[in-house]
Image (cartoon, helix red, strand yellow):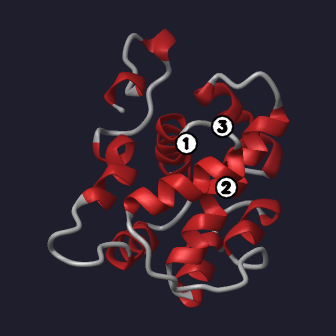
Amino acid sequence: MNFDEFTGQVQHRLRLSDTGRAVRSIRATLMTLGERIPEGAAEDFAASLPMEIDWYMTGAVHEHGQRFDWREFVARVSDISGVDPAEAAYHARVIVDLASTLVPPSDLRDLRNQLPESEDDEAWVNLFEVVDAGGWTDPEDGASTEGST
């Protein structure tokens, strides 16, 4: 999948009015993930993404491995993308689901393993709701995970 296909899929799945909003959501999600996980894990996950997108997890990040919880993740994505937190959380879920179709399962598993702060911090599972529900389904196909946010 190339950059145009990836951004087009995000724009379609999120029903965004233009490509710019799709790119902002992709950048917000991947850059914030890149800030949260160690540099090596970010590089591994991003390696299978289109070149123009993988940079958000690697080159755009000034400090990898920061410690913040799910709420802070959503707040950062919200600030960068310019949408409210609930919408930012949904956008992140859909973008991670699309990315999960491109990365090896081991890299997705490594990403998941990097996120929990402790046994008490279960909120990171929210990021993988669409993936865990079997992936995003086009509403025209009769099923959608959009209401599961």
- What percent of the width, then of the height, locates residue 141? 45, 13
Front position in the image: 70 or 23: 70
Q: Where 28 sits versus 119, above or below?
A: above
Mark 3 or mark 1: whose residue is earlier in sequence = 3
The amino acid marked with disc number 2 is Ala
Check disc 2 and report the residue beneath it. 28
Measure how far apart labels 3 and 2 are at the Cα level.
Answer: 13 Å
Quadrant that contains the C terminus: top left
Q: Which mark is residue 88?
A: 1
State the residue at coordinates (36%, 22%): 147
Mark 3 or mark 2: whose residue is earlier in sequence = 3
- What percent of the width, then of the height, locates residue 29? 60, 56
Q: Is mark 2 on a helix, strand or loop?
A: helix
Measure how far apart labels 3 and 1 are at the Cα level.
Answer: 13 Å
Q: What element carries label 1?
A: helix
The amino acid marked with disc number 1 is Ala
Front of the two marks 3 and 1: 1
Residue 53 sits in which quadrant?
bottom right
State the residue at coordinates (23%, 67%): 121
Mark 1 or mark 2: whose residue is earlier in sequence = 2
State the residue at coordinates (16%, 70%): 120
Residue neighbourhood size for the residue with mark 3, other residues' Cα within 10 Å, grouped as few (<14), some (14–19), many (≥20): many
Measure how far apart labels 1 and 2 are at the Cα level.
Answer: 9 Å
Front of the two marks 3 and 2: 2
Front position in the image: 122 or 6: 122
Asked if the residue at tag 2 contacts the one at tag 1, i.e. Cβ–Cβ closer than 8 Å, the answer is: yes
Check disc 3 and report the residue beneath it. 10
Q: Is residue 146 left or right of residue 60?
A: left
Residue projecting furthest to the left: 119
Q: Which mark is residue 127?
A: none
Q: Where 16 sits versus 142, above or below?
A: below
The amino acid marked with disc number 3 is Val
